[in-house]
Image (cartoon, rainbow, N blue to C red):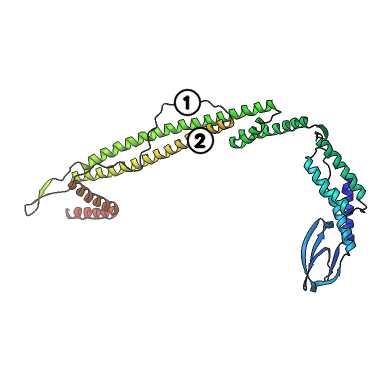
Amino acid sequence: MQRTLWMLLAGLLWLATGFADTVKLRDGTVLDGTITGEDNSTLTMEVEFAGGSIRQTRAVPKTDILEVKRLTAAERKQLQMEKDYHAALKHELDPARSLPPALYDQVISNTFLRYLTDYPDSPHAAEITARLREWQAERDRVAGGETKYAGQWRPAAEVTALVEKDNGQQWLQTARQLLAQGKLEQALPYLRGVANLPTQPEMASEARALMTQAFEQALSAAERQINDLQKSADAARKRVERARQAVAAASANASAPKAGRPTKDKTGEKYQALGSDTTALAAAQIASTKARAELLNAERELLLQEDQLAAARQKAAQLRVHARQTGIALAPPAETGTVVAAAPAVGPAPPAALPPESQNLLDQLGGIVRWLVNHWLWLLGALLIAGWLISHAMR
């Protein structure tokens, strides 16, 4: 290996100093590489740096060029032969592991045999031939049923078991780490891989046990979530029922006929004066509106709880399907005996119908209440001024 590195380094240095098109610019810069194109105004070349390990295509204006030195055909062929030689040296056998037969054949045919065909008189022919024989010998051993593993040649079946053991240990470790983080979906491919190793029955059994445990834990957590959400949904359903009762009571109270005391005007005609009864009617209307708002909030909360409960049940069902597809038998779901009512429609319960005269009176009172709420500060000031004037007038 060390000898090969030295040969590569020496060859690259030789290539950089001996075989390349050279372009010298008027500013003193010298470009070494391969001229790839030229027109009336520009010369294009592949410039090489760091002994040819770095290449860059560069277009050079001819007005900047002082001198051009081009390789001859023989020199260019010599350059290509050296490049192919150093490319062939990069193909080395792995001292620890063997390769698939197809890869041996590819390197032998496309690299070593091609080099010897293209350059039969190369000074490196003997070295390339020796490298060819090494690859052919190792390819023949692999074709004969042997495999190189950890630097030793063994029967292929034995190496298969060793490889599966190493892979299985690594996959189990990765799966345990993922399960400890709660990442069941990410851990399953590793566990399935171990469970399907034909030469490692003990590891396969351990992987299946881990999968069963992981599915059971995930399903147990999902069922606990379902129970908690079921309790929350039941509580929300009770709040909705209480809110509906409150709306019905408030609506009935607001619809009860209430009127002021009978009074006569100056002409002797009777009319209903607004008094404490109408104030009670306004309070009843406010209570009804508040009850409807509370019912709306309760129904929205119930819908949210029902949606979360449905999602949790779907997740638990998917876990069971996934476990069954993986070959894991889980215990059947427990019968809770809880009947889940259908989610109510969003929106408050319809109000009880009001008599026309009560509805008109309520509309008037609602307008008065809204005006008082919007102008209470001015009204308070007016009352204070009136009280002050009355107190001074009575002195």
Percent x, y of residue 384: 25, 53
Q: How many marks?
A: 2
Q: Looking at the picture, which amino acid does disc 2 mark? A: Lys
Q: Looking at the picture, which amino acid does disc 1 mark? A: Ala
Query: What residue do we see at 66% from left, 35% from top?
Result: 174
Give the residue at mark 1. 334
Query: What residue do we see at 29% from left, 44% from top?
Result: 289
Instruction: Determine whether, in the image, residue 232 is placed left or right of residue 17.
Output: left
Percent x, y of residue 103: 78, 43
Mark 1 element type = loop
Instruction: Determine whether, in the image, residue 134 is placed left or right of residue 255.
Output: right
Dividing the picture into quarters, in which one does residue 325 lie? top right
Query: What residue do we see at 87% from left, 54% from top?
Result: 118
Query: What residue do we see at 52% from left, 25% from top?
Result: 331
Residue 183 vs 369, above or below: the answer is above
Give the class, few, some or many, for how many residues have Cα within 10 Å of label 1's Cα (few <14, many ≥20).
few
Q: Nearer the viewer, residue 53 or 320?
A: 320
* Mark with earlier residue (1, 2): 2
Instruction: Determine whether, in the image, residue 359 is placed left or right of residue 24.
Output: left
Dividing the picture into quarters, in which one does residue 266 lie? bottom left
Instruction: Determine whether, in the image, residue 374 is placed left or right of residue 327.
Output: left
Percent x, y of residue 251: 25, 41
Give the residue at mark 2. 315
Mark 2 element type = helix
Residue 15 vs 247, above or below: the answer is below
